[in-house]
Image: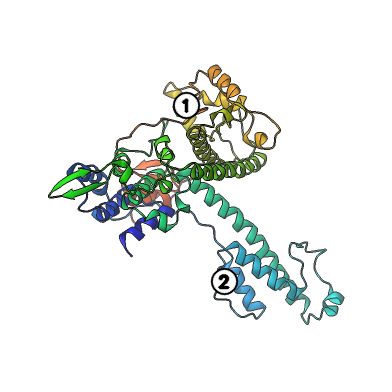
Amino acid sequence: MATIEQLYQTLDERRRPEDVAELVQKLLDGSLTPKETAILEKAAKGSLSRNAYGYTSMLQTFAAAQGAESQIAKAVELFKLNKNDQADYNNPRDIEDFIRAVSPVLHKTVGANNFIGDRLNKEKRKEAGLDLSKRSYNKRWRLLKRIEQKLQRFIGETKKSEIQKIAKHGLAHTLDFENFSSDLNTACFIAYYNARCNLRSVFTNQSQDRPFDEISEMLLNRCRTTETKFGGLFRKTKPEVVNTNWWAIAQIYTSQEVLSYLTDEQKGMLLGKWTGILQEIAGLLAKVWEENDINRQTMIVKRGNDSSTWNNTAGAWNKARDNWMNLIYSMGLDFVLETVCFGKVLRLMAADVVAWHASSGGKLDPNTHVWNQLPLPWEVFQNKADCNKERVMKCCKEAGIDAEKSGWVAPRIHGIAAFKPTPELVHGVVVSNPFLATVLKKHRYFSGKNGTWFFPGNN
């Protein structure tokens, strides 16, 4: 596989920034200045291929939903069907097509899954020409019911996976190869910044490190100007002649600078897309909210709360909202905020993190006050409540928050973080060694579940 293809593949993975930096180094070999080489080497030297351990305890992919391949393989056997090698049963549409094609064999209505009322009795099976015993009929009927249920779970899990990716890196995973590979500098910035965005959160009572670091800045600088080698010297060309694909970059990084390179049509397309995503996420948030007894006043997680789903969905909302806000300002549409200004959504916090924060002199996050005073996002989309800039600014003022700098009513401004090596984590807790991390995970340490004692030599 070519290096550019390997780099593209990382967009849908959770590869360590160090390993992506090494791929970038290979792609840009010969075109980097000594200073750029030194900056990139800060990360590349920590790649797994150069590491004494040579592996990481952390998964390098996002959790993927499992389709209905095993269930359908059993159905093919029971119904004595010919196997369809063209079908992909990790695709919801192909699963649904199979259900609709096979259900008529049992004279079963798709969606009619009541075991008492929806099955055919002996007389009706005879009328339908089904030469099956009650046991054989029930076995096939139950299997089709399970495949239908599997389809619904698969759709839900696929949506959760999509939401998790959006929460981390926006729309990077939706980029096609043609746009990604149209310019090497563009591809390298997107892939490295994507890896930084995908880093896992660390268990801490401080803020998380920002993904935009010094290496991201260096790679973005290469997108601003192209460097061409002439007799051992590097000459900067003017920004207007570079081949940077700003549309591709805008799928993951929507700063005002990046958006300034887009056409009005491109900005409008992105604004429409992010508005639609916000609306969809609002519906998912409403569902999770209804299914969980969440303490809105403190946002401290309690037993029974599905904190993972809520936090992933809240993260996706905030990421989509940031992109939406950036586009609103870039297009000169900030007057829209006088009518509708969506609020942020707070994540659920673990009680031990809150206690740790309090013991070190911290107080309840003032953003919690704003969150409590504003309408819930889905209420705004359902026209059950109004939320505009004036209302948000008033709540921020009451909480002692700068509404603009904090990103409540304007695009957030970020700095440039120093590169830090990717730590080995066990449920967010930093562990010094990947082997030790693997052992601790195996024995459920830091998971919130009862850990097991282990001794050298134990399996």
Q: Identify residue for label 2.
A: 87
Badge 2 element: loop
Q: Which mark is residue 55?
A: none
| Residue 457 x, y percent position in the rendering | 34, 56
256 shown above or below 455: above
| Residue 84 x, y percent position in the rendering | 58, 76
Badge 1 element: loop
340 shown above or below 433: above
Disc 2 crowd, CA 10 A, few/some/many (<14, 14-19, 20+): some
Instruction: Give the residue type at disc 1.
Output: Ser
152 shown above or below 440: below
Pick whichever, 365 or 437, lies toward us.
365
Side (left or right) of 240 relative to 250: left
Q: Are marks 2 and 1 in contact (CB under 8 Å)?
A: no
Q: Could you tell me which residue is drawn at 57 percent across and 71 percent down?
A: 87
Instruction: Give the residue type at disc 2.
Output: Ala
| Residue 125 x, y percent position in the rendering | 82, 76
Q: Identify residue for label 1.
A: 406
Pick whichever, 234 or 355, lies toward us.
234
Q: Quadrant of the C terminus?
A: bottom left
Side (left or right) of 71 relative to 329: right
Q: Quadrant of residue 110?
A: bottom right
